[in-house]
């Protein structure tokens, strides 16, 4: 089925799909192919303020679901209301076409468990291999859906290791077995819980530390107040604070000043810092903005 969906604000597909938030999108013959809600979604083009998509599979996501997934009704610039100084960082403005995808929380959790000590390319390969070995087939597609927690819970650790998950295999297996019985109630509870409580529950799962927990909250549970801290965000935020030895908990508290959409800003900062040089301090950015 083909959809032509109107887009509010800027949209950069390349940055959105390669910035490290999702791992099932890849370019095939000039077309972006991803797996969304158990179907293959092919992005055919962006023209005249509209995104053209083609969906393939037995059960296809509706247009409204796809609009929500891509956040097409939102203008990313809205998240800058309390942090306009960031616009003065060289290279920041062109990245405002990045869209924070609304992903499935289980796939997000499993993908980031696979992410320990791995780069984006390796994570993508691992997630694709787990899908190929344990996910459901998709009609008229050569790709497979990501397996649910029950399917992963039934896998052998040796199979997950062969898929490239390596030493993370027992963590993925243990978390899948914990969630297999009733994943929906688990996710619904975390959506409604205060952020600190939701993070604490996630970090009780095998192989889940604060960074993975915050990635799940942000990318999988739509908690835009989450601010995942990895080595790139640690560098970026310390530079903005002008505090080179600030602890991770201090970074997260400082980031509150960026406003309720700081999770979106975090992803822009992450991608920019990973692909460019050090940032000026916020004090220096304020001077540039007012000059």
Image (spheres, rainbow, N blue to C red):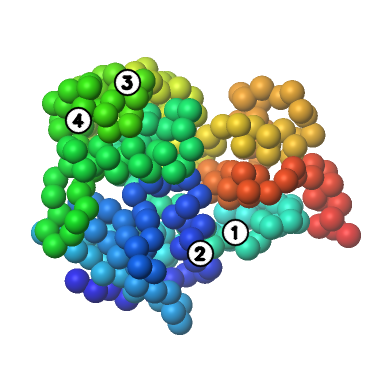
The quarter of the displayed image where residue 195 is located: top left
Disc sitting over residue 152 in the figure: 4
Residue drawn at x 38%, y 61% is: 27
Residue drawn at x 13%, y 26% is: 154
- Whole-number angstrom distance, CA of label 4 to CA of label 3: 11 Å
Q: Which residue is mark 3?
A: 171
Q: Report how many numbered discs are placed on residues in the image.
A: 4
Asked if marks 1 and 2 touch (Cβ < 8 Å), the reply is: yes
Considering only order in the chain, which callout, 3 or 2, is on the residue closer to the N terminus?
2
Tell me residue 13's x, y (percent): 46, 63
> As drawn, is 162 to the left or to the right of 209?
left
Q: Which residue is mark 1?
A: 95
- Viewer-nearest of discs 4 and 1: 4
Asked if marks 4 and 2 touch (Cβ < 8 Å), the reply is: no
Neighbor class of circle 4 (other Cα within 10 Å; few <14, some 14-19, many 20+) is many
- Whole-number angstrom distance, CA of label 4 to CA of label 2: 33 Å
- Assign a secondary structure to mark 4: helix
- Front residue (pair 52, 277): 277
Neighbor class of circle 2 (other Cα within 10 Å; few <14, some 14-19, many 20+) is some
> As drawn, is 117 to the left or to the right of 59?
right
- Front residue (pair 209, 259): 209
Neighbor class of circle 3 (other Cα within 10 Å; few <14, some 14-19, many 20+) is some
> As drawn, is 132 to the left or to the right of 256?
left
The quarter of the displayed image where residue 48 is located: bottom left
Considering only order in the chain, which callout, 2 or 1, is on the residue closer to the N terminus?
2
- Whole-number angstrom distance, CA of label 2 to CA of label 3: 34 Å
Q: Which residue is mark 2?
A: 12
């Amino acid at each position: 089925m083909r959809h032509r969906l109107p887009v509010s604000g800027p949209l950069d597909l390349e940055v959105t799909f390669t910035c490290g938030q999702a791992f099932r999108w890849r370019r095939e013959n000039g077309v972006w192919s991803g797996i969304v809600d158990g179907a293959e979604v092919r992005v055919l083009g962006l023209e005249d303020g509209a995104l053209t998509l083609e969906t393939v599979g037995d059960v296809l996501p509706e247009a409204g679901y796809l609009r929500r997934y891509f956040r097409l009704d939102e203008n990313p610039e809205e998240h800058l209301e309390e942090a306009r100084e960031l616009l003065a960082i060289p290279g920041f403005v062109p990245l405002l076409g990045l869209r924070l995808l609304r992903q499935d929380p289980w796939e997000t959790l499993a993908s980031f468990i696979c992410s320990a000590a791995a780069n984006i390319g390796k994570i993508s390969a691992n997630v694709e291999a787990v899908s190929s070995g344990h996910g459901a087939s998709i009609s008229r597609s050569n790709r497979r859906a990501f397996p649910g927690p029950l399917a992963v819970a039934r896998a052998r650790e040796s199979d997950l290791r062969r898929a490239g998950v390596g030493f993370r295999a027992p963590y993925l297996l243990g978390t899948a077995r914990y969630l297999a019985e009733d994943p929906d109630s688990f996710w619904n509870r975390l959506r409604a819980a205060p952020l600190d409580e939701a993070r604490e529950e996630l970090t009780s799962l095998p192989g889940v530390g604060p960074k993975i927990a915050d990635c799940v909250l942000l990318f999988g549970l739509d908690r835009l107040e989450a601010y995942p801290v990895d080595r790139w965000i640690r560098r970026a935020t310390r530079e903005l604070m002008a505090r080179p030895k600030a602890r991770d908990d201090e970074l997260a508290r400082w980031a509150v000043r960026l406003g309720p959409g700081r999770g979106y800003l975090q992803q822009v900062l992450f991608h920019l810092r990973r692909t460019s040089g050090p940032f000026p301090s916020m004090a220096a950015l304020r001077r540039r903005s007012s000059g």
